């Protein structure tokens, strides 16, 4: 039987491009109950079909840039984009369900106003397999790259899609910038951790 012990902080590693399937699988499990993601893909079959493509479009370039991180035996994954990295908006749009495209585009447009103008690390996606929740994996993934941010004196930015995660981010130095809610969408919470 798998004991699922907490993993030492030294077991955080870099995901290779070949690990995209494993990373996507972790994030599909992690976001199964996420308010924004399930609003975006409300039907189970639609979620399982489209969300993996969304993950690859939204954060997949982190694997190519070697800034995607995992903890343990892929119990958790964080897809970080380094300063200056751009999102592939066309690829992201191609993964969106037609019924929600206009509202999602409006949400993304409003969120864009919160992105910092100074150099920053951006965390589009972080998630832990629910089997491993409450074991410190999310904190380990955050600490790993935030140490790099501090070493380089660079800010970090994310959008929390679940209000339950805000206290975790606040414990890691992020401050809430506002709330974004458009049409029928649940609220999103842009958060910034200033350069230190």
Image (spheres, grey):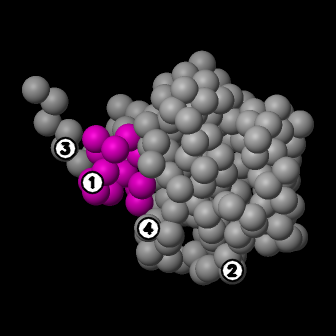
Work out whether mark 1 precedes mark 4 in sequence or the reverse, and give the earlier one.
1
Q: Quadrant of residue 16?
A: top right
Q: Which mark is residue 195?
A: none
- Image disc number at residue 5: 3
Q: Looking at the rendering, in which quadrant would you find the N terminus?
A: top left
Provide residue 23's location: percent of width, then percent of height: 52, 31
Kindly check if marks 3 and 1 are in contact, taking CB atoms under 8 A apart as contact.
no
Q: Is residue 123 above or below residue 53?
A: below
Taking the magenta stretch, the answer to whether it contains residue 135 is yes
| SS at badge 2 | loop
Q: Where is mark 2, residue-wise?
A: 178
Disc 4 element: helix
> Along the line of sight, which residue is nearer the eye, 179 or 153?
179
Q: Left of 151 or right of it: where is 127?
A: left
Q: Separation of disc 1 and disc 4 at Cα?
A: 16 Å
- State the mark number for residue 135: 1
Q: Tell me where the magenta segment starts and ends, as one range.
A: 128-140
Q: Are marks 4 and 2 in contact (CB under 8 Å)?
A: no
N-terminal of the pair, mark 4 or mark 2, is: 4
Q: Using a 10 Å C-alpha cutoff, classify the residue at mark 3 as few (fewer than 14 neighbours), some (14 to 19) or many (20 or more).
A: few
Residue 38, position as x, y percentages in the image = 56, 46
Whole-Å distance between the Cαs marked 1 and 2? 29 Å
Q: Please state which of the two labelled residues, at mark 1 or mark 4, is closer to the viewer.
A: 4
- Under circle 1, the secondary element is loop
Cβ atoms under marks 3 and 4 closer than 8 Å: no
Give the image location of residue 185, x and y in percent.
67, 61
């Amino acid at each position: 039987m798998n004991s699922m012990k907490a993993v030492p902080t030294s077991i955080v590693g870099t995901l290779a491009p070949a690990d995209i399937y494993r990373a996507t699988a972790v994030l599909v499990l992690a976001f199964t109950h996420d308010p924004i993601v399930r609003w975006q893909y409300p039907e189970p079959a639609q979620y399982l079909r489209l969300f993996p493509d969304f993950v690859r479009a939204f954060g997949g370039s982190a694997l190519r840039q070697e800034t995607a991180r995992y903890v343990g035996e892929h119990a958790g994954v964080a897809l970080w984009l380094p300063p200056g990295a751009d999102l592939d908006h066309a690829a992201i749009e191609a993964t969106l369900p037609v019924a929600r495209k206009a509202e999602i585009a409006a949400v993304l447009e409003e969120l864009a106003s919160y992105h910092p103008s100074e150099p920053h690390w951006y965390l589009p996606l972080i998630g832990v397999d629910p089997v491993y929740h409450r074991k410190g994996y999310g904190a380990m993934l955050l600490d790993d790259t935030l140490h790099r941010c501090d070493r380089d004196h660079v800010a970090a930015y994310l959008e929390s899609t679940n209000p339950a995660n805000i206290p975790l981010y606040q414990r890691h130095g992020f401050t809430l910038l506002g709330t974004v809610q458009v049409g029928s969408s649940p609220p999103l919470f842009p958060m910034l951790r200033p350069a230190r």
